[in-house]
Image (spheres, rainbow, N blue to C red):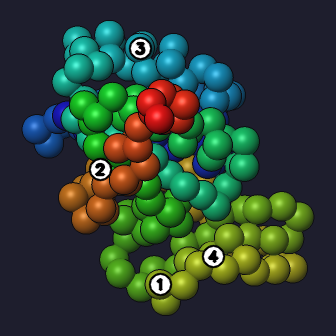
Amino acid sequence: MDLVVDCSRKGVNLGLYASGVSYELFEPNAKGDELGLLLNRLLSENNFELEQVKRVLVTLGPGSFTGIRAGIAFCEGLCFSGKRTLHGVSTLRALASHFPEGETIILHARANLYYVLKDNCESLAEYKIPPQTHENLPITPFAKLIPQIEPSRTQKANYLMNPYSKVF
């Protein structure tokens, strides 16, 4: 089973994907500190256990800096044991999975500034007239990106090693 976590846009989006079936939870007012509770809720409502999750995909931004940090840290924690692989993807590239290749993807950044994916290039652009954005798209198609993304090697590091344990 795969888990997708997106905290780079408004609120928290979580999705579980198993055998072509998707289970999603979107909480528009949730913050990163609620990720554990929300994941437990999603798992229990759909009769799953955390041990069934084998791959985790997290969005890496652009977007909410605090949300991105919370999402990445939470997913790194889930994968720290090595029981799951961790995959990261640009939020814009993940949203592009909703559309045919070549579609321009736009997310609001702040006053008149927008994150843009166009011709496979990410940038920050200024628009005087607000364009149509892709803020509220669901995360269902994100799971199909997991096999295309190399897992992070960070989770394999032994962070618990005592550097002073070597006997001289």
Q: Earlier in the sequence, mark 3 or mark 4?
A: 3
Instruction: Please determine whether, in this image, residue 129 is positioned above or below residue 88.
Output: below
Residue type at numbered disc 1: Asn
The residue at which mark 2 appears reads as: 143
* Crowd class of label 2 (few under 14; some 14 to 19; many from 20; radius 10 Å): many
| Placement of 8 over or under 43, stated as above or below | below
> Looking at this rendering, what residue extends furthest in the left direction?
19
Q: Is residue 153 visible?
A: yes
Q: Which mark is residue 40?
A: 3
Residue identifier under label 4: 116
Residue 15 appears anywhere in the view: no
Residue position for label 1: 120
Three-letter amino acid code of the residue under disc 2: Ala
Question: Which element type, helix, strand or loop, lies under badge 4?
Answer: strand
Percent of width and height locating residue 120: 47, 84
In this view of the protein, which residue sits in the foreground, 11 or 58? 58
Instruction: Give the structural element (helix, strand or loop) at label 3.
Output: helix
Marks 1 & 4, CB-CB < 8 Å contact = no
Q: CA distance from mark 2 to mark 4?
A: 22 Å
Eyeballing the image, is 40 above or below 149?
above
- Alpha-carbon span between mark 1 and mark 4: 10 Å
Q: How many marks?
A: 4
Task: Quadrant for the N terminus, please.
Answer: top left
Q: Earlier in the sequence, mark 2 or mark 1?
A: 1
Residue shown at the point (62%, 46%) measured from the top left: 68
Residue at screen point 29% across, 43% down: 85
Find the distance from the CA under tag 3 to the CA under tag 2. 19 Å
Earlier in the chain: of badge 1 and badge 3, it is 3
In front of the other: 90 or 45 = 90
The spot of residue 132 in percent (x, y) is: 65, 69
